[in-house]
Image (cartoon, grey):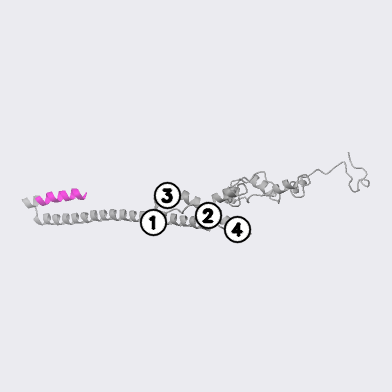
Amino acid sequence: RTCTNYGTLAGRGARCALELPRRGIEEFWKGGSRDATINAATKQANAISGDPWPAVLLRQKSFEDMHKLGTLAGRGARCALELPRRGIEEFWKGGSRDATINAATKQANAISGDPWPAVLLRQKSFEDMHKLWYVLLKEKNFLLAEQHEARQRRVRWQHHGRLKKVKLSMKRILTVLSRREIHQQALRAKDILSKQEVREGLETQRFHLEESMKVLEYRIKQAGPRDSLAISAWKATLQKYEADHA
């Protein structure tokens, strides 16, 4: 079928039999604030977005996947390749900004003990202190996030003591590791020094042995071909020195 009367079909709202195929133009507003087929709650949920794609994940994608990401990079677009969650919710989970727990639980979670003493940290291995360092670093970032929110809301933040304890524990870990490394370097230096003393003693003994061999060779040469008890003793001693030198 063809459109024969263009004049009658040129009015507003007229439809031609040869309709233009849809090119997916509705995807520019589908699921967004201009979509009339969804309610306000769905629009609000669709407006929540995650973090931008990090370069370390993009390097693992193929050209086709990155091409899809490029075409879906518009505002409000939803990519089929979802970015995995990296635990960003742990910056407020269990704290004052967590809406899933009540005030009593938040108050109980805010109670903290003493900082890690150095006498206990010295008994830990490097792997244990490495794990403890990242636990303290996570707690430090958690508290700094709460402090930043309190400054934005212009309210008093009441956990300065917790942050001070975390920083003090991290400082003590660095101190223990530094002193342990200094002690290990001292032990290595002592071992190197003892080996050097042994080597110098052997070199000194070798030098004296070579000097004694030269003296005996000179005496035997000066004595000539005559045979005597002293010359026989010198030759026996020289053979012994040569065996030790070899």
Q: Which residue is mark 2?
A: 140
Work out how far the residue at label 2 is from the one at label 4, CA to CA, in angstroms. 15 Å
Q: Earlier in the sequence, mark 1 or mark 3?
A: 3
At numbered mark 4, what does the secondary structure look like: helix, strand or loop?
helix
At numbered mark 1, what does the secondary structure look like: helix, strand or loop?
helix
Under mark 4, the amino acid is: Ala
Residue 87, x across and y down, in percent: 58, 47
Under mark 1, the amino acid is: Arg
Q: Which residue is mark 3?
A: 126
Q: Earlier in the sequence, mark 3 or mark 2?
A: 3
Q: Earlier in the sequence, mark 2 or mark 1?
A: 2
Q: To which quarter of the image does residue 172 belong?
A: bottom left
The extreme top residue here reads 1
Image height check: is 46 above or below 164? Answer: above
Work out how far the residue at label 4 is from the one at label 3, CA to CA, in angstroms. 36 Å
Q: Nearer the viewer, residue 92 or 50?
A: 92
At numbered mark 2, what does the secondary structure look like: helix, strand or loop?
helix
Which residues fall within the magenta stretch? 233-246
Q: Earlier in the sequence, mark 2 or mark 4?
A: 2
